[in-house]
């Protein structure tokens, strides 16, 4: 069994920073792409950032220059450093990982979500 566990969300003032973490655990052989998505109230889930196993990154235009995605392959963990937060960044943030299990099954796993609220 494989699961993703997120942490690091919270309430922060505009201009503040947060660091989100997402750790994968279970019967994992390898992890390919890892990413962060977010869903604001009344809106569809949208891509925030993706990082490949080799470290190549892709960002949504709305977060470029403010968000940084990184990963620690040894820990099966992906991070999202969020700076210069804006009220429009308020959303539930979900991590996603493309995981090859030890049974050689390819899974797309999602975390449970962590709330980020930007408000003064």
Image: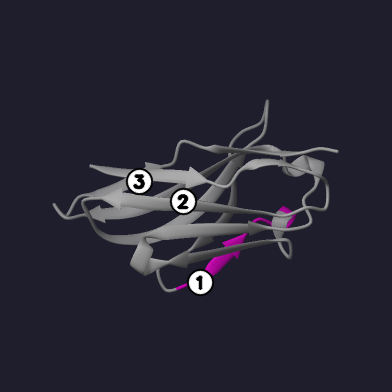
2 or 1: mark nearer the eye = 2
Give x and y (percent) for residue 62: 73, 53
Q: Residue at x 34, y 68 (%)?
A: 74
Residue 81 position by quadrant = bottom right
Residue ID for mark 1: 56
Residue ID for mark 2: 22
2 or 3: mark nearer the eye = 2
Measure the C-alpha gap from mark 2 to mark 1: 18 Å
Within-10-Å neighbours for mark 2: few <14, some 14–19, many 20+: many
Q: Is residue 88 magenta?
A: no
Q: Which residues are magenta?
A: 55-62
Give x and y (percent) for residue 30: 27, 62
Query: Which is nearer the N-term, disc 3 or disc 1?
Result: 1
Find numbered disc 3 in the image and state the secondary structure of the residue it sits on.
strand
Q: Is residue 80 toward the left or the right of residue 66 in the image?
A: left
Find numbered disc 2 in the image and state the secondary structure of the residue it sits on.
strand
Residue ID for mark 3: 108
Find out whether the residues at labels 3 and 1 contact each other: C-beta distance under 8 Å. no
**Residue positioned most to the left:** 103
Query: Which is nearer the N-term, disc 2 or disc 1?
Result: 2
Residue 64 position by quadrant = bottom right
């Amino acid at each position: 069994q494989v699961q993703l566990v997120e942490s690091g969300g919270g309430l922060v003032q505009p201009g503040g920073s947060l660091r989100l973490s997402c750790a994968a655990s279970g019967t994992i052989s390898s992890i390919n792409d890892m990413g962060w998505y977010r869903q604001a109230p009344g809106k569809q889930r949208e891509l925030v950032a993706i990082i490949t196993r080799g470290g190549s990154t892709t960002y949504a235009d709305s977060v470029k220059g403010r968000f940084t995605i990184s990963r620690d392959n040894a820990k099966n963990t992906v991070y999202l450093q969020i700076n210069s937060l804006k009220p429009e960044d308020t959303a539930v943030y979900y991590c996603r990982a493309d995981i090859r299990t030890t049974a050689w099954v390819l899974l797309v796993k999602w975390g449970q979500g962590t709330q980020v609220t930007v408000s003064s």
